[in-house]
Amino acid sequence: MQRIGVFVCHCGTNIAATVDVKAVAEALGHEPGVVISQDYQYMCSESGQELVKSAIREQKLTGVVICSCSPRMHENTFRKAAASAGLNPYLVEIANIREQCSWIHKDIATATDKAIILGKAAVAKVHLNTPLSSMESPVVKRALVIGGGIAGIQTALDIAEAGFDVDIVEKQPTIGGKMAQIDKTFPTLDCAACILTPKMVEASQNEHITIHSFSEVADVKGFVGNFTVKIKKKARYVDETKCTGCGLCTEKCPMKKVPNEFNMGLDNRSAVYIPFAQAVPKVATIDPNYCMMLRSGKCGVCSKVCSAGAIDYKQQDTFIEQKYGAIVVATGFNPINLDKYDEFAYNQCPDVVTSLELERLMNAAGPNGGTLLRPSDKSHPHTIVFVQCVGSRCDDEKGKPYCSKICCMYTAKHAMLIREKYPDTEVYVFYIDVRTPGKNFDEFYRRAVEQYNVHYIKGMVGKVTPKSDGKIDVQASDLLANEQLHIDADMVVLAAAIEPDKTARPLATMLTTQMDTNDFFTEAHPKLRPVESATAGIFLSGACQGPKDIPETVAQGSAAAAKAIGLLCKNSITCNPCVAHSDELMCNGCSSCEKVCPYGAITYIDKEFRMPDRTTKVRRVASVNPAVCQGCGACTVACPSGAMDLSGFSNSQIMAEVDAICK
Amino acid sequence: METFTYYPGCTLRTKAKDLDTYARVSAEALGIKLEEPADWQCCGGAYTTAKDEIATKLSAVRVLNSAKEAETPLITVCSACHNVIKQTEYDISRDEEMASKVNNYLGLSEPYTGGTKVYHYLEMLRDVVGFDKLKEKVVNPFTGRKIAAYYGCLLLRPAKALAMDDPENPTIIEDFIRAIGGTPVIYAQRNECCGGYITMEDKAQAQKRSGAVMGSAKDMGAEMVITACPLCLYNLKKNSGSDLPVYYFTELLAEALGLKEASNE
Amino acid sequence: MNKNLKEQVLRSSGVNVLKCMRCGKCSGTCPSYGEMEYHPHQFVYMVENGDIETLMKSESIYKCLTCFACVDRCPRGVEPAKVVEAVRLAAVRQQGNNHLEPSEIPALLDEDLPQQAIVTAMRKYAK
């Protein structure tokens, strides 16, 4: 005989304003097996939970139904409460009368009726609940950080600090990411390399951190606590263990016409190269697209001059496999391609540049050694126009719908640095809004205007016309003066939108994590769980989750590390016991379930069965690995014989719910 | 032989006869058959974007329908006609209300709701003939000549409907120039309006606009400017105050193919 | 009258003026800016405010070249040219309010003027 307790939550006015909770409690009290049915203002509170616990003890309940918000919110809360009162936590069912009822209906009578039906279904289900116990699975005490920019580096350092081993996988030949390309950072105007390189060195020297540079994640299998990752170490044609980073090969290499990615293509590098002087690891890499030896067998100069004998033209890509307990994604961002914005003449004129290109032009390690010169004729620019929001905040197919967040600040930074260094240069910024929400940010931007006399004009550039005398005619609107201006500029800087790295989407598929339509990784909850993805064991760090500046990135990097450490410090984690199981006597070995399982949890085994005539027969039957199974239920749907069933959501339970609803 | 329903437009029959003749002889030489529909009317020169304007779009729908009935794609040479017809096609295939009003009025044997492929002559050269094939047939290449392509506003915009090329960084006419042996000159004002019909309302404005276009072309080293629209040609020639010669692109095409003298007889 | 006019202009143009983020790119790119009293971004703003009669009385509605630069370059897809056209139609559709009469045309002719110009101007300025 079941003894079921029903508890209906008001959730303040969230439920009670649209659903007559007292009527629901009253109605459900008449359901078969229900011995107590009450309502309360906030079931999830201490006193609410105490109501449940004392009812379990006093009424000797065998099952509990909570009519409240979505199980995603508080299923765990009530399971724990039941367990502490001595009831198996899987004998608790939640009827969602908030997200699925009170929040979407307006008419009280309809909403109340629906809440009662949902409650009845939950009661019918709980009648058939069986006590389940969670299994435990071990946690591999090693973390993987995908991406070696400031986000990945910060996360790795924090995880290493807690005493765990961390691997950083970075697809470029060096770690450092975008921050290594930046000249100065806002709002303090410190030199980016000066604050980044100590962290890069720390990461390379830390005994817990292993850096796999020039490598990519090729495959991910497994589940939280137990990931198996295949890493592809791309061939650099240089033996990392022998190379000393002396740079002689880069000097002597005769192929010097390779566009230098680190300087955004504004100057050239050689085919064998070290990306920048502070690269970590400080190891040369050969670009197979340009190396004459690799392409046509001619040359070999680098190999001849290398005193360490580190050049290896025969090197191949290698694959390593490693187990991890937690994975942190830190794949970063890139500025968008500006091909669709040629009203700004980006493709027509070398003096129209993006903000990242300007960073390189102003940087001491850039193409001009730190002097700002026009790319076309290396002359000094007297008038510079900045165009904001290029490709951001767009409601069309060309650009991105979101605000890229960092551009207002970095343009103010660029403007101030230019005015500081070249007081004779006039700087104009055409803006729609100026967004400066961080600490000391607005004061920073006001300094640009009030102290450095940067001309901020509310309006937008409509057309950029390069002229043969080298000047650029910038036609723009000044909305406050109600004029259309023509400015004779020497350089135009476009604040291009930023987007996630292109490797992010295939990576999301490998990790089975969620992404939004802009290719940013989706966090488990936008406010309360910003560094966890919806997939257990996968954490998010940095701009791969959304546009952000360096202070926020470092904060989020440490937060992701904290979450990862929370996982890694456990020796084992409890698995979800709501897993699939197959009735061997009904299984016909068709493999339908194996094919639909997204987690690879089902395998087929040959098993001996006793036949009615006392002979034994070997049959092929399904076997579910309960540690890998995530309880999605796809196999139960695919199974043609009904052999596959899901604990906690069995076919009979679902049918009971349907019957209760249809009555 | 690929056949197209050819819509010349009113001006190509009169003031812009050259544009038409050169287009025809060149098409023939390239293996393209141009067949005019039995009955067509002036397109109106400008597409009225207002949703409640129906009468002004009817002649475009009629010619789209003729092409549909002839089971051929439709082709135009004049930029303005192309813009009107292409935008009509775009809207009628997406706006059910407009389609039903148009069809109620026209009483065609079968209602027209879109589906005709509309080519501009340049698109035909690029996609049907191919610029490399064109290059092979050139006998009088414009070697060393610095030619500026003038797109104007109507060939490229609105980009969603016209879908001919990148509206801000187009290459189709520059590729044509290269195919006939010339050196294309890129200048920023090549896709900005010459003024168009504004010459009737405010001549000074037309002079200002076409002056800016020609000025930009000359500034970047052009020796001549080519265009696909009779009104653009008029504005650039007469209103700009520039001394740069302006030609129809079809005239250069015919000359390159060695057909110019023959077609003038 | 005012409210109906706004509704008429919005319905006729098919434009959602609320999408505008007041960036000013349309006016920044408009080749007719100098000739207009009210500029594309103001058309969008004033129609939203219902201040349409002011626009109808202004010569600005006849200065638009219908070049679609504002339509293609607006980052929000507002299509200001369609708003200008809808206001112009509201003006010109009124009895006796044609902006260009056939009688005015002979004075504007020259031997090279393609009739395309006349036809287009009549389409834009007269009903």
Image (cartoon, rainbow, N blue to C red):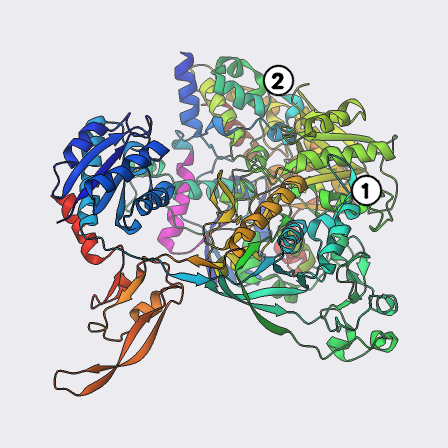
Q: Which amino acid is tagged 1? A: Ser
Q: Tell me if I can see residue B258 in this picture.
A: no
Answer whether residue A28 is visible to the viewer in this image: yes
Residue B41: image x %, image y %?
44, 39
Find out whether residue B13 is within the magenta segment.
no
Q: Which structural element holds mark 1?
A: loop
Name the outermost residue toward the bottom. Answer: A615
Q: Nearer the viewer, residue A217 or B8?
A: A217
Location of residue B30 (image quadrant): bottom right
Image height of C115 relative to A338, above or below? above
Q: Locate the C terminus of chain A and report the quarter of the image it occupies.
A: top left
**Tag 1: Cα neighbours inside 10 Å, few (<14), some, or many (≥20)?**
some
Query: What span is in magenta?
Result: B57-76
Q: Residue at x 27, y 48 (%)?
A: A87
Give how far across and how far down residue B172 sits, in percent.
62, 53
Read off the chain for label 2.
Answer: C
Amino acid found under the numbered disc labelled 2: Glu
Task: Give the residue pinned by disc 1.
Answer: A468
Query: Which disc is residue C37 wearing?
Result: 2
